[in-house]
Image (spheres, helix red, strand yellow):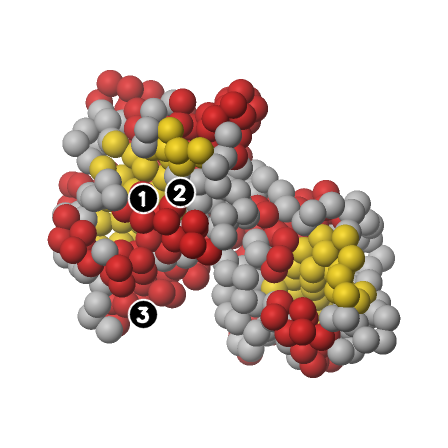
Amino acid sequence: MIVIATHTLRDAGLAAGGHDKMNWVMGHMPILGRIRDRYQSAKPLTGQRIAISLHLEAKTAVLAELLHIGGASVAITSSNPLTAQDDVAAALAERGVEVHALRGADAAAFDQLHQRVLDIEPTLIIDDGGELTERLHKERASLASGIIGGAEETTTGVLRLKALAREGRLQYPMVLVNDADMKHLFDNRYGTGQSTWDGIMRSTNLVVAGKTAVVAGYGWCGKGVADRARGLGARVIVTEINPVRANEALMDGHRVMPMAEAAPLGDYFVTVTGDFGVIRAEHFRVMKDGAILANAGHFDVEVDVAALKQMARSTRPGRGPEVVGYELSDGRVLWLMAEGRLVNLAAGDGHPAEIMDLTFALQALSLEDLLKTRPGPGVYPVNPEVDAWVAGIRLQALGVAIDRLSPEQRQYLENS
């Protein structure tokens, strides 16, 4: 670890590789490119201090640089210690953004990195999983009065923010970017679906076709994971607690059953629920030898890693550092991916650039909207005009035209 002026980096000499990654994804993010063109001259974020906690890889770095170009002072850390890419962090630091990120940081270092980001005394925040908001409310509450607002990236973070708001403890407005149509319908479904299997396949180099994939949770992320598994030729089992979603999974052609019944059948297990203890000791006891355990939910609590470690008599390396085998007393080996953390980022590069182009455009524009509207503390949806603009620009970038209502058609619908 090295600390250079206002940066905390693993190795500043890795920057060249990070620049290559950033330049590649920028070529596939036309919506951010459109915003970037405006920010070059308009500088709508001048005078703002933006603290960011997101998975620090190339697409995130493009967003952070965009906000810096828009006139803001920006400080960023990673929302997960295994999703920081040290080469990208070094490149972003060279582009004028304050960076505090180390891949593989332990708990103490991880906390310190977040504290350093909060040291800029932010006026705006971009959060993932409610990490910055929770730390700020618990440990740096004096900063809350200076925050105009922020935007939240994930389902898990939305749940935490809504709980804070219900309790009357949320001290500033937060825009729920995760709930925007151009986010959850695309990022959560297509982004999570593709990137989860990308992380699993590149780390194991094993076939998916002909095997059984158990997907825990059938929200938008679970739908994407299940759909991509089927597309790869897997037989898909869905476990759920919500009867409506369970019916939806059945209608989509998947088998539905409790985890206790699915556990002996699965070759791959992917948790996408946002809750803890989804796969537990009683499930490990009946799993096949060689079963692969992966988590695509925000926190590393969905697979009970502590119980797995306690049950194991030894460990063995997998194909690479992202896969570790836990040998149980009867000789079976269960393979855990990325320490139970986000497999698509800890064992891969996260969502495709075209998907994050949508989400990060919503993030940037939602901060602008907060500066204009200045709402009070609470949780707020993304401005529908912002959602529609992002959708329209995406179609333009693809060269796709759609029909428009005539005045008569609009009047007919309004009077129906």
Q: Which residue bears the numbered disc 2?
A: 77
**The C terminus is located in which quarter?**
bottom left
The residues tagged by marks 3 and 1 sit, at their Cα atoms, a distance apart of 26 Å
Residue type at the position of mark 1 = Arg
Q: Residue shown at 31%/49% (left/top)?
A: 115
Q: Residue shown at 53%/76% (left/top)?
A: 242
Q: Is residue 400 above or below residue 118?
A: above
Which image quadrant is residue 170 in? bottom left
Do the numbered discs 3 and 1 sit on residues whose CB atoms are within 8 Å?
no
Do the numbered discs 2 and 1 sit on residues whose CB atoms are within 8 Å?
yes
Q: Is residue 259 visible?
A: no
Q: Position of residue 41 (x, y in %)?
A: 24, 18
Mark 2 secondary-structure assignment: strand
Left or right of residue 413: residue 285: right
Of pointers 2 and 3, the one earlier in the residue sequence: 2
Q: Is residue 196 above or below residue 139?
A: above
Which image quadrant is residue 225 in? bottom right
Q: Which residue bears the numbered disc 1?
A: 116
Left or right of residue 94: residue 266: right
The residues tagged by marks 2 and 3 sit, at their Cα atoms, a distance apart of 24 Å
Q: Which residue bears the numbered disc 3?
A: 163
Residue type at the position of mark 2 = Thr
Q: Position of residue 252 (x, y in %)?
A: 66, 64
Of pointers 3 and 1, the one earlier in the residue sequence: 1
Mark 1 secondary-structure assignment: helix
Q: Nearer the viewer, residue 389 or 67?
A: 67
The residues tagged by marks 2 and 1 sit, at their Cα atoms, a distance apart of 9 Å
Residue type at the position of mark 3 = Ala
Q: Position of residue 154 (x, y in %)?
A: 43, 55
